Amino acid sequence: MNKREKHLIEKYSRQIMMDQIGISGQKKIFNSSVSVIGCGGLGTSAAQYLSMSGLGGLTLIDDDKVSLSNLNRQTLFSEKDVGKSKSLVLSERIKSINNSIKIIYFKKKVTSKNIKRFVGKDKIVLDCTDNYESRLVINKFCHLEKKILISAALQNFELQAFMTSSWSKHDNPCYKCIFPELSKDTAMSCDEMGIIAPVAGLGGLIQANLAINFILKLKSNFKELILFDCLNLDLKKIKITKNKKCTVCN
Ligand SMILES: [Zn+2]
């Protein structure tokens, strides 16, 4: 074993010692790459924990700049970063956590025209955006390009999360099956309805957790909506079904 291998084995020893991971599981994490679309509350927390797990590659996409009101929940930004590009600052912070990770960042908003170029070969896409229009673009892209989509959304003390693989089985739903049209809740972003710090962090953590479970070929359920009420600490899972009239996955 060379020096570099010894260093990595020590760094990730608490994961490698788990029966469900081992050396082979850790290698799967090293060899995986994930796109994080939206580098706000969800995106910073998901990217941080994925990189700490030893993920091989991250693509960070966001056209926004850090603002003072982001700092209550966007864990890796500080007051010195206000006015700077979120995807750029996040890529620098992540590098300091895991210097072997390959990071690509884009200071752009995803559209149906550019998303394929940004996400590239990443198998897993985390939707960490806060608007319905981007969510539809990401969902359609993931369905057509056979990507695993892991989505989360936040509102006050509540969060919801799910993963979809609508292309892999005829009865797996997509995002649009669950949210066929713009409702008042899906239309509002954190800026409009308010969000408390730990809830944003938890949303990103759940996304990172679902991604790692998928990478390790552990439990992945593509027909389940996770609802977490952080005020009562009440977790619910709801079975989700395909909409036979869905314009994306049918
Ligand atoms: Zn659908």
Image (cartoon, rainbow, N blue to C red):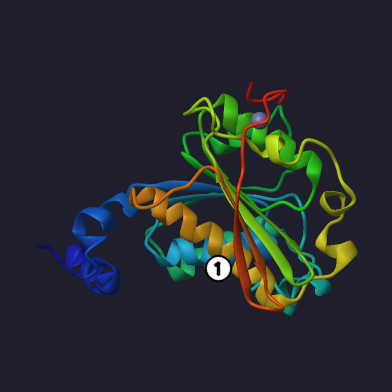
Q: Horizontal placement of 190 versus 22: left or right?
A: right
Residue type for callout 1: Arg
- The quadrant the C terminus occupies is top right
Q: Which residue is more in the foreground, 1 or 135? A: 135
Quick check: which quadrant has ligand 1?
top right
Image position, residue 17 (x, y; %): 21, 70
Number of residues whose C-alpha sits closer than 10 Å to that of mark 1, classed few (under 14), some (14–19) or many (20 or more)? some
Residue at x 86% of width, y 64% of height: 191
The quadrant of the image that shows the N terminus is bottom left
Q: Quadrant of residue 6?
A: bottom left
Q: Is mark 1 within 8 Å of ligand 1?
A: no
Q: Nearer the viewer, residue 75 or 167?
A: 167
Corner quadrant of residue 135: top right
Q: Position of residue 246 (x, y in %)?
A: 71, 26
Q: Which residue is mark 1?
A: 93
Q: Is residue 206 rendered to the left or right of residue 182?
A: left
Is 28 displayed left or right of 133 in the figure? left
